[in-house]
Amino acid sequence: MSGASASAGPPRAGGSLRAAAEPETWRRLHFIPLAAGAGSFLVGVWVGLARLGLALPGSADLAAFHGALMISGFLGTVIALERAVAIGCWWAYAAPVLAAIAAGALIAGAPAIAASLFLLASIFLTFNSAFVVARQPALFTVVLTVAAACWVAGTLAWMHGTPAGGITGWWLTFLVLTIIAERLELSRLLSPPRASQWMFIAAVALILLGAARGEFASAAAPLAGIGLLAATAWLLRYDIARRTIRLAGLARFSAACILAGYLWLPVAGALLLVVPPAAAAFSYDAIVHAIAIGFVLSMIFGHAPIILPAVTGLRVRHGAAAYLALALLHLSVALRVAADLFEYVDLRMASGPTTVLAFAGYAASLLVASRK
């Protein structure tokens, strides 16, 4: 494994990516769900800016679906597509195709249809992940399957009218467990002690119990908070990014994204323990975005130059300007969390455009470096 891939840890669903073996015509079809996911991301960002208080047209009807657009529409589609590419069988593409159609339905103003399709997509992703467990039994493949099942649970909660905190708790658990399972796979390169797996299992169990108890919307969140702190401790101790940060090029950039993202997972865990979601006006917002932007999107910055070529066949490069975009992303999270904790409404509003600028700068840096 190259230093770059070892650092970023391309999510592989328990097997080597097989995109290179696909006919070019079939690979081009990957752009359809990718486009749907990107559209969901753009609409979700637009709605998110409006929720922060910016006067933006056309956002009122979708204001309540910001989380569904970003997590199920964008990240769910991308994760399902990557898993399908890794499996390499035609039937595995049912998950990303259904998620892409669901994203379009949600944007078109049909949330009931979208929820049903997202449920089917999440069920298919869980089946795909279970297929990988049968093919490659390992702790990380089992956790990937459990993570996909959390997407199912969150979508069912959405369909049954559960309050937003209960839904988001399951969806965030889906993302967190997916990422840490992939990092567990790569940690094998460091030959960690067998006892470390029990620490990993304990962290996963606590996070799951916290989601099941609805702690992301409660006045006390001990299990989820301790679980996130334990997961961070495991990642900082056994993640290979601690070594690949010493390398150069993409390996170092990917490791920088990963390690920077790890700074926000314990912030969310500490807030769950000290200022749980129901204890303060903006505590829920700070916790959700510390995970969703600080942790998850930082991982996307680090993975994109590896995942995009594997899924699309395009040659993607990164440049030094990507570090500026990464720094701006984490500045935006710091502004958001600080504004939430101290109830600075104007600063909170400013954090949104800062996040958008970070993404735009990152996309531009990839485009320029790739063309060169």
Image: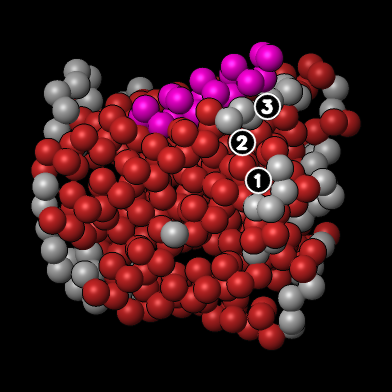
Going by the picture, which residue comes out furthest to the bottom? 195
Asked whether disc 3 touches disc 2, contact meaning CB atoms under 8 Å apart, the reply is: no
Residue denoted by label 3: 317
Picture quadrant of residue 172: bottom left
Pair 3/1: label in front: 1
| Crowding at mark 1 (Cα within 10 Å: few <14, some 14-19, many 20+) | many
Of residues 36 and 332, the one nearer the viewer is 332
Question: Residue 303 at x, y = what percent?
Answer: 62, 41
The residue under the point 33% across, 79% down is 222
Amino acid found under the numbered disc labelled 2: Ala
Q: Position of residue 210 (x, y in %)?
A: 38, 73
Query: Which sits earlier in the primary sequence, circle 1 or circle 2?
Result: 1
Instruction: Please determine whether, in this image, residue 103 is positioned above or below residue 92.
Output: above
Residue 312, by quadrant, is top right
* Disc number for residue 304: 2
Name the residue rendered at 65%, 46% in the picture.
252
Q: Would residue 129 be seen by someone viewing this image from the given angle? A: no
Q: Is residue 287 visible?
A: yes
What separation in Å lies between label 1 and label 2 (alpha carbons)?
14 Å
Residue 358 drawn in magenta: yes
Q: Which residues are magenta?
A: 356-372
Q: Earlier in the sequence, mark 3 or mark 1?
A: 1
